[in-house]
Image (cartoon, rainbow, N blue to C red):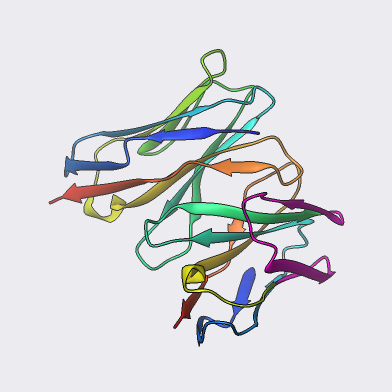
Amino acid sequence: GENVEQHPSTLSVQEGDSAVIKCTYSDSASNYFPWYKQELGKRPQLIIDIRSNVGEKKDQRIAVTLNKTAKHFSLHITETQPEDSAVYFCAASKGAGKSTFGDGTTLTVKP
Amino acid sequence: DTAVSQTPKYLVTQMGNDKSIKCEQNLGHDTMYWYKQDSKKFLKIMFSYNNKELIINETVPNRFSPKSPDKAHLNLHINSLELGDSAVYFCASSQDGGETQYFGPGTRLLVL
């Protein structure tokens, strides 16, 4: 089955700095790669996603890049703010309910 | 209007009991999921149910069973509860193809 590895498990940055979280996947049939943000005590919510026919996608301060050949994708957050502090999960999916999540990254943005 | 709802929000029970958690989605999605999130925050999929096909994570004990009365509901039944079952359980749904998952608010289960 699919295996998704996510690094780092914890990340601490100063407000205004950039943060990068990386994920690798094993199944070349995976074609959809979402990122979810989970604030403390809340549910995970989608913040950005990318499909296998696209190499990069950007939405304001967040961007995701995908390298299909190397089977890795990354989340980039620029100009971090304290409200970006949360647990971030990557996932790899090949449709029909077959999704695998990474183990999560706890991001702390220090004011 | 809540997209994915779960009841109850909190569940405190004794070891050995049987309990159920209900999940409903009003998004018209055709795939529903159950996840377990433990104290280390790992989000582990337990089941996905898509067009009457059940995909089970092989690590899930058979004390856990999903039941879907219709496309909008996927309930989770747990028999003979154990201390290690204490966790937050999230229900989610997606539209196949889109695969963005919409999560419910979670049910915090505490087994004493």
Residue at x 23% of width, y 49% of height: A108
Residue at x 59% of width, y 23% of height: A54
The answer to whether residue B102 is visible is: yes
Above or below for A29 versus B105: above
Position of residue B48 in the picture relative to residue A70 (left or right): right
Residue at x 25% of width, y 41% of height: A11
Residue B35: % across, % down: 58, 59
Above or below for B111 versus B41: below
Residue B53 belongs to the span the image colors magenta: yes
Q: Nearer the viewer, residue B6 or B78?
A: B78
Residue A81: % across, % down: 23, 48
Task: Locate the N terminus of chain A and report the quarter of the image it occupies.
Answer: top right
Task: Tell me where the magenta segment starts and ends, as one range.
Answer: B51-76
Q: Residue furthest top?
A: A69
How many numbered marks have been drawn onto this rendered protein structure? 0
Residue B39: % across, % down: 38, 62
Residue A61 belongs to the span the image colors magenta: no
Residue at x 40% of width, y 56% of height: B41
Above or below for B13 versus A12: below
Residue A37: % across, % down: 43, 51
Classify residue B49 by image quadrant.
Answer: bottom right
Position of residue B110 in the picture relative to residue B57 (left or right): left
Q: Nearer the viewer, residue A18 or A93?
A: A93
Position of residue A4 in the picture relative to residue B31 (left or right): left
The answer to whether residue B1 is visible is: no
Q: Nearer the viewer, residue B18 or A27?
A: B18
Above or below for A55 versus B9: above
